[in-house]
C-alpha cells in the first residue's frame, strides 16, 4: 500500500500526467508488493474501458464539437439575448443562459467555455466589461455543462456506480438551473456596482423569431432525454443519435461545416476521447489494486469509527471533493473516489442519484478553483489574459456555486424530485 500511494504522490508532484501517474502506481504495486503477474496491468486497463456505455463519451463530444462549428452557438446566443439581455449586465446574463443551453447539447464544461467564450468575450469587451470579470464568469458558467444533462461526467458516474444514467440526467436539471441562477445573481450585483450596460428589451416578435432560429438545436436535449426515458434508446445510443442530428444540422441544414472539416473534428474528438478513456482504464487498475488491498472497507471502517452521522460524513466527503478539485482532473477524481466512498454512502442510505449530482456540482466548482481549475484556465486562454488576473473575480462566483451546493446537499429533493416523479 505504501508503494501504491507513494508512487502516485511522487508522480503527481513531478508533474506527470494524472493518467500515467495512476497507471505507474498500480504497476509499481504489482511489481513490488504483490505476487500477481504484472500482465494483470494490461488486462485490468482493457477491462476498464470495455464498456458499451462509455462509448457515449466520444459520441457526445462529437455532437458538441459539430454543434460548436455549425452556426449553432450564435442562434443559441441570440435566443438567450432575447430572454435576458434587458437585465442589468445583459451580456453577462446572455453568457450564462447561453452556456446553460449549449451545455445541454455538448455535455462538456471545456467545450462550453470554448464555444461560447470565442463569441461572447469580444462582444463583452466592446461593451466595456472588464475582461478578467468576463473570463471568471465564463469559466463558472461553462462548467454548468458538467451539471446540466447530458453531462459526460454523469455518464462516467453512472458506469462507476451502476446507477441509471437517465435518472442522473434528470437529477441534474434543477441543480443546473439553481446554480445558473446563483451566477446570474452575482453578475447582477457586479453589473449594478460597475454600471455595466443592459440591452434593449426584446419584443414578443423578436423573442419568437429568435426561438424559431434556435429551435432545431434546442431540440437536441429533448431528443436525448426523451428517447432515454421512453426506452427508445440507451444513453450510448442517445449519444449516437445526438451526433447524427448534429451532423445533419451542421452539414445539410445550416451548411456551415464541410465534409473535410467533419473529418478534422472527428480526429480531434478521437484524441480527446483517448485521453479520457486512458484515464478511466488506468483508474480501473488503481481501483482493482485498492479492492485487492481491502482499502474501501478499511477506509469505510475508519470513517464510520469517527462518526456514523449521515450529515457529518456527507459534509466531509464534499470537503474532500472540493480540495481534490483544486488539484486533480474531474474524471480522475470520480474514478479514484467512487470505489472507496460509494460503499460507505450505500451503508448510510444516500440516494445514488443525489450523490452523483452532488459530485457533479462539486467538480464544477473544482474546475474553476485555483491552482488547477481547468475550465477557468481555458476561459483565460480564450480571453488571452494571465490566469491570475481572474482571481479577483472568481471567488464571488465560486461562493454562489457553493451556496447552490449547500442547498443541494441539505435538500435532496432538489435532485430527486424529477427522476422520482418520472420513474414512479
Image (cartoon, rainbow, N blue to C red):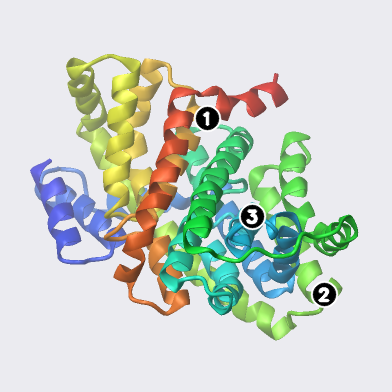
Residue 254 bears which disc, if any? Answer: 2
Say left or right for 47 vs 420: left
Say left or right for 88 vs 17: right
Measured as percent of width and height from the top left, residue 392 is found at 33, 62
Crowd band around label 2 with a 10 angstrom C-alpha radius: few (<14), some (14–19), many (20+): few
Q: Quadrant of the N terminus?
A: top left
Q: Quadrant of the C terminus?
A: top right
**Is label 2 or label 3 in front?**
3
Q: Is residue 47 visible?
A: no
Which residue: 62% across, 68% down? 65
**Could you tell me how far apart the alpha carbons at marks 2 and 3 are, in whole angstroms?**
23 Å
Q: Is residue 130 above or below residue 32?
A: below
Question: In front: 122, or 65?
Answer: 122
**Could you tell me how far apart the alpha carbons at marks 3 and 1 are, in whole angstroms?**
25 Å
Q: Is residue 312 visible?
A: yes
**Could you tell me how far apart the alpha carbons at marks 1 and 2 are, in whole angstroms?**
37 Å
Say left or right for 74 vs 374: right
The residue that disc 3 covers is 97
The residue that disc 1 covers is 353
Which residue: 72% across, 73% down? 70
Say left or right for 120 vs 232: left
First reached walking from the N terminus: tag 3 or tag 1: 3
Residue at disc 2, secondary structure: loop
Measured as percent of width and height from the top left, residue 8 is found at 18, 53
First reached walking from the N terminus: tag 2 or tag 3: 3
Q: Quadrant of residue 322?
A: top left
First reached walking from the N terminus: tag 1 or tag 2: 2
Question: In front: 244, or 179?
Answer: 179
Amino acid at each position: 500500500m505504501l508503494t501504491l500511494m507513494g508512487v502516485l504522490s511522487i508522480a503527481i508532484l513531478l508533474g506527470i500526467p494524472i493518467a500515467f501517474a495512476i497507471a505507474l502506481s498500480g504497476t509499481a504495486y504489482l511489481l513490488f508488493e504483490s505476487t500477481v503477474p504484472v500482465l494483470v496491468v494490461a488486462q485490468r486497463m482493457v477491462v476498464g474501458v470495455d464498456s458499451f456505455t462509455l462509448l457515449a463519451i466520444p459520441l457526445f463530444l462529437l455532437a458538441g464539437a459539430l454543434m460548436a462549428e455549425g452556426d449553432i452557438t450564435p442562434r443559441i446566443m441570440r435566443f438567450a439575448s432575447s430572454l435576458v439581455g434587458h437585465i442589468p449586465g445583459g451580456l453577462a446574463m446572455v453568457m450564462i443562459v447561453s452556456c446553460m443551453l449549449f451545455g445541454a447539447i455538448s455535455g462538456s464544461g471545456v467545450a462550453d467555455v470554448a464555444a461560447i467564450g470565442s463569441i461572447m468575450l469580444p462582444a463583452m469587451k466592446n461593451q466595456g466589461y472588464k475582461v478578467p470579470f468576463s473570463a471568471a464568469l465564463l469559466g463558472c458558467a461553462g462548467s454548468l455543462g458538467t451539471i446540466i444533462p447530458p453531462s459526460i461526467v454523469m455518464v462516467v458516474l453512472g458506469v462507476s456506480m451502476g446507477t441509471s444514467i437517465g435518472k442522473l440526467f434528470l437529477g441534474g436539471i434543477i441543480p443546473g438551473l439553481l446554480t445558473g441562477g446563483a451566477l446570474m445573481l452575482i453578475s447582477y450585483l457586479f453589473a449594478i456596482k460597475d454600471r455595466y450596460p443592459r440591452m434593449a428589451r426584446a419584443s414578443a416578435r423578436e423573442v419568437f423569431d429568435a426561438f424559431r432560429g434556435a429551435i432545431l438545436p434546442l431540440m437536441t436535449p429533448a431528443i436525448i432525454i426523451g428517447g432515454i426515458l421512453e426506452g427508445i434508446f440507451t444513453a450510448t445510443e442517445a449519444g449516437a443519435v445526438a451526433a447524427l442530428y448534429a451532423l445533419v444540422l451542421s452539414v445539410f441544414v445550416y451548411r456551415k461545416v464541410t465534409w473535410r472539416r467533419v473529418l478534422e473534428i472527428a480526429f480531434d474528438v478521437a484524441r480527446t476521447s483517448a485521453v479520457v478513456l486512458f484515464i478511466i482504464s488506468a483508474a480501473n487498475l488503481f481501483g482493482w489494486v485498492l479492492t485487492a488491498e481491502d482499502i474501501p472497507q478499511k477506509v469505510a471502517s475508519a470513517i464510520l469509527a469517527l462518526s456514523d452521522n449521515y450529515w457529518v460524513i456527507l459534509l466531509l466527503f464534499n470537503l474532500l471533493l472540493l480540495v481534490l478539485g483544486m488539484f486533480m482532473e474531474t474524471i480522475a477524481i470520480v474514478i479514484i473516489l467512487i470505489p472507496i466512498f460509494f460503499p460507505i454512502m450505500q451503508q448510510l442510505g444516500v440516494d445514488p442519484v443525489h450523490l452523483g449530482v452532488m459530485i457533479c456540482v462539486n467538480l464544477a466548482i473544482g474546475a474553476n478553483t485555483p491552482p488547477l481549475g481547468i475550465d477557468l484556465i481555458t476561459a483565460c486562454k480564450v480571453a488571452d489574459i494571465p490566469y491570475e488576473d481572474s482571481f479577483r473575480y472568481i471567488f464571488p462566483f465560486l461562493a454562489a456555486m457553493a451556496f447552490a451546493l449547500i442547498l443541494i446537499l441539505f435538500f435532496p429533493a432538489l435532485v430527486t424530485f424529477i427522476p422520482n416523479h418520472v420513474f414512479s
